[in-house]
Image (cartoon, helix red, strand yellow):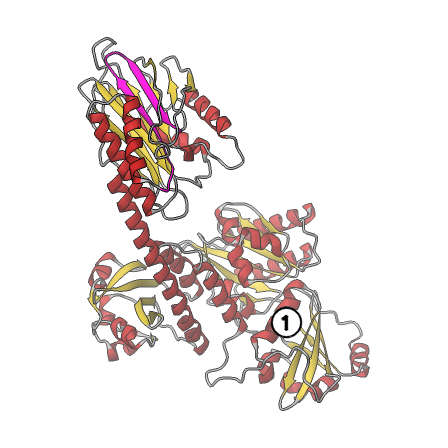
Amino acid sequence: MPRHGERPAARPLDQALDELLATAVRRTGASGGGIYVLDERRRVLCLVVTGGLPAEYAEPWARIALAAPDPVADAVREDRLVWLGGLEDLARCYPRAAAALPYRFCIAAAPVPGRRGALLLLWPADHPPHFSNRERARMTHAAHRVGGLLRAGTGQMVIPEQPRLVHVHAVGAHGPQVADGFAERLPGGSLALDTEGRITLVTSGAARLLGRDAPQLLGRLPWQALPWLDDPAYADKYRTALLSREPTFFHALRPPATWLDFYLFPGPDGISVRIVETALADQPPTVPVPIRPPTAGGPVGVSRLYQLMHLSAALTEAVGVRDVVDLVAAEVLPVFDAQGLVLSVADAGRLRITGHRGYRPEVVERLDGLPLDTTLTPAGQVLASGVPSFFTDRAEMARSYPQTPKISDKQAWAFLPLIVSGRPVGCCVLSYERPHTFTADERAVLTSLAGLIAQAMARAYLYDTKHQLAHDLQQALLPRTLPRIDGLDVAARYLPASHGMDIGGDFYDVIRLDQHTAAAVIGDVQGHSPAAAALMGQVRTAVHAHATAGATPDQVLARTNRVLTDVEPDLLVSCLYAHLDLSAHRLTLTSAGHAPPLLRLPDGRTAPLTLEPGPLLGIHPEALYPPITLPLPANSLLALYTDGLVEVPGQESDDTTAGLADHLAHTDVTELDQLINELVHHSWPQGRHTDDIAVLLLRTTGAAGGTSASAPSGSARRPEVTD
């Protein structure tokens, strides 16, 4: 009789892959592993064969989305060997996987050439943290052999519903009678488990302590043969011993009142278990493990619980609604072997679709906006009752909802209500392209998962709402367009901080004063809050009013300062004001504690401009802001920016500013919008800037005043606010 997960008669390609995995495990000294094959259509890595651990423990990772942050997916996607020398490496590089696999063991994943799949191997905790050259060479060789088999077997590869199981370690057969006699003479009882968790040896003492005859135990998993051991806490101890290869121990109560001690000693070909009766039989152990009675539907297996933990950890990483949709599509669909997804939220009495996968646009259009009391699909009823509905085939669906099967070509459905604190949030629909029977534990996990998705959706919706509000407010406070001024090219950009409210106090403006003069202003209000944004709006309005009234640069800042001191703000404000006379080719600057601008001359020389800054705005009503005037030749470039561009952790601002000036001097980029990208990337190559950034670039073209060679009329590009 074939073992669970095996076909009655393996095809040549399957048999070759099975033998190759067993050989790779033995030659590298690994404890177990598996071979993944890429499903090109679904962009999912499928585990086709595994060995060295029970099939149920591999189940949560039997399907891995190619885009997922996972060692196997990274190995294939980036075409590199991934090595993790222990739990610390796993937690640092793949925190989601570490949350679901809190065990001490080593992992290596090698890509199959051509990105057709991957070879995964596991080592116990006592393996050195470094991958030896011999192990690397043998694993790489094995991965290449897998690639060769897959190329040669094109057309023969059929991805199984469940991975096949193979014995990767040969069980020794020396002196079985001597070994049996030895075990029988030991006090207590002894069991032997293979790497799949099945009992292969039972002593008479173990049978007596466990209350079962040997034939009732042999060939079965302990938690299947003994219902009182069917608890995730006990299965987790076995999992620890198997993966980490470290001895472990637990207490268990054999009903009605017998406490037993179990000692697990793992090895390469299985686990030896010693069972003794607790020394004080009339007293429970000091730290008893709680026993849950089996439910009518059967307990959820430990692999399903770890599967739920894995998905829960993944959902905590989702920020916006789009992230939730992408994550559910990438993580949930492969795990449950579903092909379709519809996520909808309850909005104004209707179900609005926020994301979907595996459905044609016309189907989504028909389903979007259905009323909550719709009878077209079960979604409304499921949301109203809070009870999920499962339909194994089209006939079952048609009996209750005759129109639903006509909408799409799907064959089975799971409708999961999304409820948060008793409030309906929406509905999640998983669908299948073939009839699908939902087992009791699968329904339990999906029901629990719906609660996690609901929480994630609620958080994501609030985040998106807040983010949109912040974006709209920032857009309203910054200029919608910049004026077109002859002789001047202008580009601007505002980038909110990479975290926080996305509402900041950075601002900029360009003001046309007359036909040949203009003013440019940039500033920064302290903080990231609505109050900072509101004060920013007041400063920008005051500067604009005084500049257009004909005030000189020093008067513009002095008068704006008096306005702010009357308001008595609690926040500090820096500001830089530039007056550009395009006909006389002259630049006048004045600063209220702001970062110095950069000036690139036509010959390429670039440097920060030196000027005497006045105090920050709003501190002293009689503060003075001395101006400085200098030439501004045609084809000069003036770069104004806020301190978020140059205040980089671990670096001095002066050094960052000097490096930015050098980069501006030598760059070949001439298009101003692209030049802003260059400057930001130079200071923040990883893109995770910690403060708001505003950048305003102004380039004189020589068109104004007629004193320079003719040039195209200047233009002002629409400023960008980048999320």
Q: Magenta residues: mostly which secondary structure?
A: strand
Q: What stretch is highlighted in magenta?
A: 570-594
Instruction: Say which quadrant the C terminus sits in.
Output: top left
| Badge 1 element | helix
Whether 281 is drawn above or below 410: the answer is below
- Asked whether residue 655 is drawn in magenta, I would say no
Instruction: Say which quadrant the N terminus sits in.
Output: bottom right
Whether 404 is drawn above or below 625: the answer is below
Residue 6 in sight from this viewpoint: no
Residue 704 in sight from this viewpoint: yes
The one of 646 and 681 positioned closer to us in this rendering: 646
Residue farthest to the left?
A: 515
The one of 82 and 39 positioned closer to us in this rendering: 82
The one of 563 and 347 positioned closer to us in this rendering: 563
- Asked whether residue 588 is drawn in magenta, I would say yes
Q: In this view, does 125 lie to the left or right of 48?
A: right
Residue bearing mark 1: 238
Whether 396 is drawn above or below 640: the answer is below
Residue 395: x and y, percent? 28, 77
Q: Residue at x 48, y 35 (%)?
A: 648
Residue 555: x and y, percent? 28, 24
Residue 20: x and y, percent? 60, 57
The amino acid type of the residue labelled 1 equals Tyr
Residue 204: x and y, percent? 74, 86
The one of 461 and 500 positioned closer to us in this rendering: 500
Q: Which residue is drawn at 61% across and 54% down?
A: 88
Q: Residue at x 62, y 73 (%)?
A: 197
